[in-house]
Image: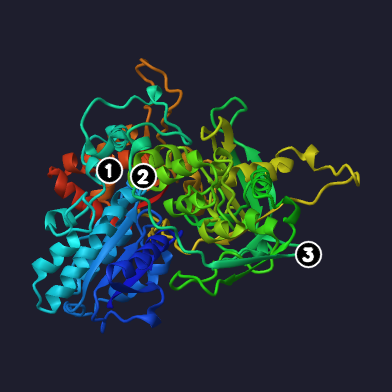
Amino acid sequence: MRRFLLLYATQKGQAKAIAEEICEKAFAHGFSADLHCISESDKYDLKTETAPLVVVVSTTGTGDPPDTARKFVKAIQDKALPGDFLAHLRYGLLGLGDSEYTYFCNGGKIIDRRLQELGARHFYDTGHADDCVGLELVVEPWVDGLWAALTKHFTSSRGKAERIGALRVALDASQRMDPLKPELLHIESQVELLRLGDPRRRDSEARGQNAVDGGRSGAPVVESESKSSLTRSEPPLSQAALSIPAAPPEYLHVRLQECPGQEESQASVTSVDPIFQVPISKAVQLTTNDAIKSTLLVELDISKTDFSYQPGDAFNVICPNSDSEVQNLLQRLQLTDRREHCVHLKIKEDTKKKGAALPPHVPDGRSLQFILTWCLEIRAVPKKALLRALVDHTSNGREKRRLQELCSREGAADYNRFVRGERAGLLDLLLAFPSCRPPLRLLLEHLPKLQPRPYSCASSNLSHPGKLRFIFNIVEFLSHTTKEVLRKGVCTGWLAAVVAPVLRPDMRVSRAEGGKAPTPEISISPRTTNFFHLPSDSSAPIIMVGPGTGIAPFIGFLQHREELRRFHQRGVLTHLKVSFSRDAPVGEEDAPVKYVQDNIRLHSEQVARLLLHERGCIYVCGDAKNMAKDVNDTLVEIISKQAGVEKLEALKMLATLKEEKRYLQDIWS
């Protein structure tokens, strides 16, 4: 059996899931995958590795490798390593990212670039998969082509007739690409290419491409005329022969046991960082009742904890799933009467899953209700592996066929439109397909960890000692999966309910006792990677770009520098430029500009002087989807014009600012 080393660097589990899929498929193609998390440095050694290496790497933050890769990246970036340190190594890398962020797939690109600098060479070209339109658009053909590339590597290294051997394997590979052609081995996400054009056309073009079946040209698909839905397809898909993936192997044995009543706290949630339970000392609604968005400022009392922070830091809020959604899920699984039972897990003795391990985010002996509430991301968009697993627990033939379509290669457009595009969760699917009755085991095997939500600190501990403030919008959106339902964000909706008694003190009166109810508390943890800090030189000029709640960290910046409220009058803030994107007056000569990038462009000479001649810093905080890209493009335009250089040179100058930590982003989608 031909062995290769398979490493994954994951933040939320996607890279791990893809690596496990590669591992499962390897055996059928005549290979043996030695699978490890990239953080498990005691289980592999690239310096002495003779087998080919396959790496799957996600991206976190604004372009960083995931936390699990931090130690690995630090090791390979050692400047003392010679340029031929990994000259013996041959590898292929699959990067995961989201093109809504400026530094697309940068986690994988950092590792890829450094491996090349140390002498390693590709046996298979890098793939960049884009979560903005669907990772599978790149992941599936990249994995399909991997087997031919591995075969070519092994036959070439043994000196055999590589062309005959590679062509034989190519017959079984995907017809969508010829994995032996170098120009096709280098797979890039289509959206990555669209980024070079007009960014405003990107979303519409991507949707149009996804709607075209098999690359056929023709009239654009008009969604309003389509009869397709989550539960129903149309020809040609409804009549097509389907390429359905193999069912993921079962690997968990679940036992529900009655257990004595026990108090379960959020402290049971698994976390690599320390968790602090802190009271809410203040809450203020910053917007009017008729505003488009509701924005709240919340103050936490951290005076009795060891929690510390500095302006620009972010922290995690540990939040639960919606109680009503948890109860609906229990009811749909017919487990309502067992919700207080303790859950015990073990690996099935006859499992075919290689390297099967208990999910670390599911604590043993906790109640089923606790696990569904605090441990599993029940709103996560189901991966195709979960859809495929649901097929085998669906009795109705029409429903089974539709689930098969949604997890098939031929149904990729429908999956992107009705599952990913509508943000359908597991509960949505179970309501849409009533004959689907999955066991609890399946949920525990496939649902990812409920992730804590990050928020920027909006205060300075110098100005507010013992306090921590943050600002957030209450997220609301319409779900159209089965019926139109208004939903709130998992964390912001919960936070709004928690702080309601503080916003309205009359709600804190306990009806039973006639006194005040306890002060509400939440659990928080520090963020391990914090980079969005003020320069050490307090005299260095800074530019702060923060639309909406993106202003939060800059409040802390200003408080920290001068500890005062009237920043502008006292000279700490020398220029305040406000943009009104929602209610800007139209046609008025002195009307304020609409977007932050317009204000930056309006003051292009000052911006260029601060950044290029006075070693100033620029901080951008807020929306990644549009604002951050538009600001980045505007900075390139300004540098090009003010420095008198071509666009490519301006891009390099901006990249230098980022490397020098003078162009910093704290953005989210």
Question: Which image quadrant is residue 120 in?
Answer: bottom left
Identify the amino acid type marked 2: Cys
User: Relative to residue 9, is residue 324 depicted above or below?
Assistant: above
Q: Measure how far apart labels 2 and 1 are at the Cα level.
A: 8 Å
Q: Which of pointers 3 and 2 lies earlier in the amino acid sequence?
A: 2
Residue at 49 percent across and 57 percent down: it is 313
SS state under label 3: loop
Q: Residue at x 23, y 80 (%)?
A: 81
Q: Which residue is mark 2?
A: 132
Quarter that holds the N terminus: bottom left
Q: Which mark is residue 191?
A: 1
Residue that badge 3 annotates? 262
Residue 2 shows in the view? yes
Question: What percent of the width, then of the height, locates residue 516?
Answer: 84, 46
Judged from the image, the secondary structure of the residue bearing numbered disc 1 is helix
Dot 2 or dot 1, earlier in sequence = 2
Left or right of residue 430: residue 236: left
Q: Who comes first in sequence, dot 3 or dot 1?
A: 1
